[in-house]
């Protein structure tokens, strides 16, 4: 059994095999309806419990479909529906009980520490469905989407504009493993996690952080951004938005990337803040494919976890 908590926990080969098997399963399925299982149903009889302490559209539905396509079943729980979520039961006790009921657990929660605490007491694999620190499932879908449009990501250049948030942190970990260049354009105050930046430096990752959005986007194969205010953000929102204003992904900024560059956003988006509708709905945008590919990347993650 394997846990999927941080991109940095997996080897380069493990990550590559997850992406490659996602491509294979996706192409073998062809145009089957989303709720129809794959022929081999590799997790038939298995149950995945999903717990959401924060809202979700894509993660919730794409994981549910992923489990169905693999032949398993899922139980989706919100914060106010279980004792741990309401703060009435310890993680240890919840983990021990869930280990008897389910075969795999997926959690979206605020504190990354909670995921590690669950891992200590679980006898089943845990998947990180987003924390304040990271969003590894999103990044696997993004790499799948990038490679479907542009080929192998190794040696390519990705530009990240705006907040150095949980998604940006996971991207840095991915840049280390998949060996692409990552150029982050953000204000100093809203940069990515310092420990993850140090890990990138230690691994000779091609990570470049600048306060100039145009320098970050120049010559990129892909330009990415995310909401300026994340679900776990507690600071002064207006001050943060003001500081991030010049990092908006608009036509002018896209024009300094490669002419055939793609635009990505994990969604949900705040249109006209971090990205203009012109870019998001434009020809270079692959945001809908990114959301769809969550199903396929996550099927592969689930299979790797229950191995
Ligand atoms: N990208 C993403 O994780 O979306 P949701 O918050 O809707 O799950
Ligand atoms: N950075 C965003 C990602 C949402 C999928 C958040 O944490 O709210």
Image (tube, helix red, strand yellow):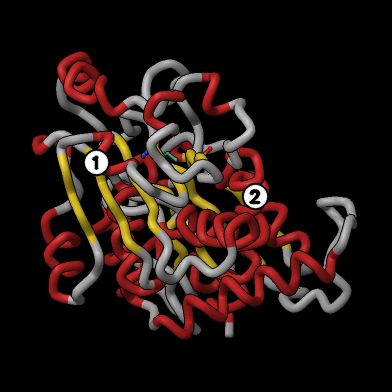
Residue 60 seen: no
**Which quarter of the rendering shows the C terminus?**
bottom right
Residue 215 disc label: 1
Residue 265 spot, x, y in % from top left: 48, 39
* C-beta proximity under 8 Å, tags 1 and 2: no
Q: As rendered, which of 300 and 275 lies closer to the eye? A: 275
Q: As rendered, which of 152 and 240 lies closer to the eye? A: 152
Look at the picture and state if 55 lies above or below 51: above
Q: Quadrant of residue 48?
A: bottom right
Q: Report which residue position mark 2 lands on.
A: 62
Q: As rendered, which of 55 and 269 lies closer to the eye? A: 269
Residue at the spot x=69%, y=72% of the render? Answer: 46
Mark 1 closeness class: few <14, some 14–19, many ≥20 residues within 10 Å: some
Residue 194 spot, x, y in % from top left: 11, 55
Residue at the spot x=34%, y=65% of the render? Answer: 175
Disc 2 is placed on an element classified as helix
Residue at the spot x=19%, y=74% of the render? Answer: 204
| Cβ at disc 2 under 8 Å from ligand 1 | yes
Q: Earlier in the sequence, mark 1 or mark 2?
A: 2
């Amino acid at each position: 059994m394997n846990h999927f908590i941080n991109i940095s926990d997996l080897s380069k080969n493990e990550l590559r095999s997850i992406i490659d098997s996602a491509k294979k399963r996706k192409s073998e399925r062809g145009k089957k309806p989303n709720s129809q299982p794959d022929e081999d149903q590799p997790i038939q009889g298995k149950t995945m419990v999903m717990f959401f302490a924060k809202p979700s559209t894509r993660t919730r539905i794409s994981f549910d479909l992923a489990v169905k396509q693999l032949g398993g079943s899922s139980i989706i729980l919100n914060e106010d529906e279980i004792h741990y979520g309401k703060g009435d039961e310890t993680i240890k006790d919840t983990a021990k009980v869930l280990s008897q009921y389910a075969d795999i657990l997926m959690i979206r929660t605020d504190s990354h520490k909670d995921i590690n605490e669950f891992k200590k007491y679980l006898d089943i694999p845990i998947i990180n469905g987003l924390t304040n620190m990271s969003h590894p499932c999103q990044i696997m879908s993004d790499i799948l989407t990038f490679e479907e449009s542009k080929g192998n990501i190794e040696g390519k250049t990705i530009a990240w504009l705006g907040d150095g948030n949980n998604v940006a942190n996971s991207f840095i970990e991915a840049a280390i493993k998949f060996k692409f260049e990552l150029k982050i354009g953000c204000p100093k105050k809203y940069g990515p996690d310092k420990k993850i930046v140090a890990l990138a430096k230690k691994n000779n990752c091609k990570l470049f952080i600048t306060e100039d959005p145009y320098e970050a986007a120049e010559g990129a194969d892909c330009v990415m951004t995310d909401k300026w205010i994340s679900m776990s953000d507690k600071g002064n929102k207006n001050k943060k938005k003001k500081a991030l204003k010049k990092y908006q992904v608009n036509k002018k900024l896209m024009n300094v990337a490669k002419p055939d560059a793609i635009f990505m956003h994990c969604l949900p988006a705040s249109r006209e803040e971090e990205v203009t509708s012109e870019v998001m709905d434009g020809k270079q945008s692959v945001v809908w494919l990114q959301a769809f590919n969550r199903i396929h990347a996550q099927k592969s993650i689930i299979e790797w976890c229950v191995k």
